[in-house]
Image (tube, grey):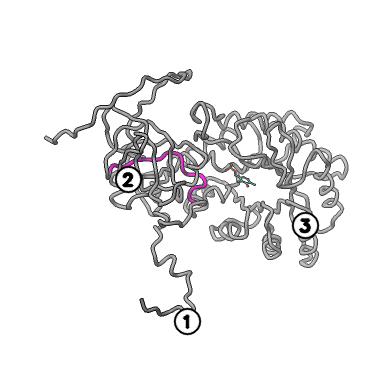
Amino acid sequence: MDKKRYERPLIKKLESNMPNKFGTRTEYTPKTHIDDVAVSELAEKYGSPLFVISEKTLRATIKKARNAFESRYPKVQFAWSYKTNYLDAVCKIFHQEGSWAEVVSGFEYDKALHNGVDGSKILFNGPDKTDADLKKAITNNSILHIDHLDEFYAIKEIAGELKVNAKVAVRVNMDTGIYPMWDRFGFNFENGQAWDVLNRIMRSDVMNLVGLHSHIGTFMLSPNAYAVAAKKLAELAIGVKEKYNHEVNYIDMGGGFASNNTLKGAYLPGQDISPSIDEFAEAITSALISSNFEPNKLPLLILETGRALVDDAGYLVGSVISNKRLSDGRRSTILDIGVNILFTSFWYDHKITPAQPFTKYTEDTVLYGPLCMNIDIIRNNIDLPLLNKGDKVVVHSVGAYNMTQWMQFITLRPKVVLIDLEGNTHIIRENESLQTLLELERIPEHLQEFDL
Ligand SMILES: *Cc1c(COP(=O)(O)O)cnc(C)c1O
């Protein structure tokens, strides 16, 4: 029989804060397995920290989202937002599930091509498309979502030189009742900028207006804001039809639907307050259906939703390095997970659970990362049982933005593994090593030698 471990008794204040409508329940169960694979085995085999992606959760989430829209609207197309997670294996799952690619840089554009996406199924967004990017995209028959007038002029010139018709859409920003308003991207609806660029496109003989686009913000908690945006885009599309007798093929509502994460400072957990994909779908599709499109001429509806589709499929496994008491008596636990790999801890209170059974005694804890930097805080306060050196933890819902915004800082990036539908694990990105960095560095001749 194993010797029982001593746990120091702890006097705890009764909960003094207001219970929410679900009470003050803080107990939880350990996360010992991800899709039936033991977390301890994953860490042993692939190291810690380790990103883990569940193919099962990912495919189920995509199917649910498709179903939410396709059951309400006749023509729907998803386009995967590469910047949300552009690991090739993740992108390929999206493409296998029918998603086109949505990219915001030349590098992402090349990645989509490399993944085998046909140029005509790549939507090119963002303010920074170089002349070379534009030329490549126009040649490949991709769709350019115009962000500003300088881009309009560049496309006009390049398409003129190539003697081809560039497929373009206009990114529109607008007041949807959400403030601060995202008015830095695209052309404003209310002040007439959007009409101005539409007129220029319609009068150009080297551009074909195929769509209207908006991406009103990110981690949006209001489905109604999308209904407002859909109505305004529909109004523009119908206006273009009336004025120029030209039909746009699609209306692209962008992304930004909230995931199940909890924003810092939120009163209730994200799982309880983030609207479901059905609520977003209902708001958008009913706005389009009740607009003045002829019933048999509804445009294709494109969605570029990112975080809401991939967040829950991603986990980050980590280990406890040490426990210590802060000068004010609070418990702190140091993990091998830092803000360099868990970038989203700057704005989310991530759900973090131990990966092994624990006793019922919990304590308010500060979770630090391993970096020698004061900003390296994973959770400012979280109620956790005592964790011992070497114990494993699982951070939930980390699939969006972490594997693209991670930094090579003090420690290197860890491995990413995918658990497939049969429960087999695959490395989909190797961990970095000193060699990874050295490959990029060059030493000038006069710095080769030193003598200490
Ligand atoms: C980032 C981005 C998305 C995806 O946003 P999410 O908040 O991850 O859903 C979609 N479209 C555009 C243009 C973007 O820049």
Can you say whether 364 is above or below 149 in the image? above
Specify the quadrant that holds the C terminus.
bottom left
Residue 409 x %, y %? 45, 56
Q: Which amino acid does the dot numbered 1 rest on?
A: Glu
Q: Is residue 6 visible?
A: yes
Asked which quadrant contains residue 279, the reply is top right
**Horizontal arrangement in the rendering, residue 279 relative to residue 248 (left or right):** left
Mark 1 close to ligand 1, CB under 8 Å: no
Can you say whether 191 is above or below 429 in the image? above
Q: Which amino acid does the dot numbered 2 rest on?
A: Ser
Residue drawn at x 35%, y 44% as measured from the top left: 334
* CA–CA distance in space, label 1 to label 3: 43 Å
Q: Which mark is residue 319?
A: 2
Residue drawn at x 30%, y 41% as measured from the top left: 323
Contact flag, marks 2 and 1 (Cβ < 8 Å)? no
Q: Which residue is mark 1?
A: 445
Asked which quadrant contains residue 183, the reply is top right
Pick whichever of labels 1 and 3 is earlier in the sequence. Answer: 3
Q: Residue furthest bottom?
A: 445
* CA–CA distance in space, label 2 to label 1: 42 Å
Q: Which residue is mark 3?
A: 150
**Depth-wise, is mark 2 or mark 1 nearer the camera?**
1
Q: Find ligand 1 in the image and state its quadrant.
A: top right
Q: Give the structural element (helix, strand or loop) at label 3.
A: helix
**Depth-wise, is mark 1 or mark 3 nearer the camera?**
1
Q: Which residues are magenta?
A: 391-403
Specify the quadrant that holds the N terminus.
top left
**Horizontal arrangement in the rendering, residue 237 relative to residue 385 (left or right):** right
Residue 162 x %, y %? 76, 66
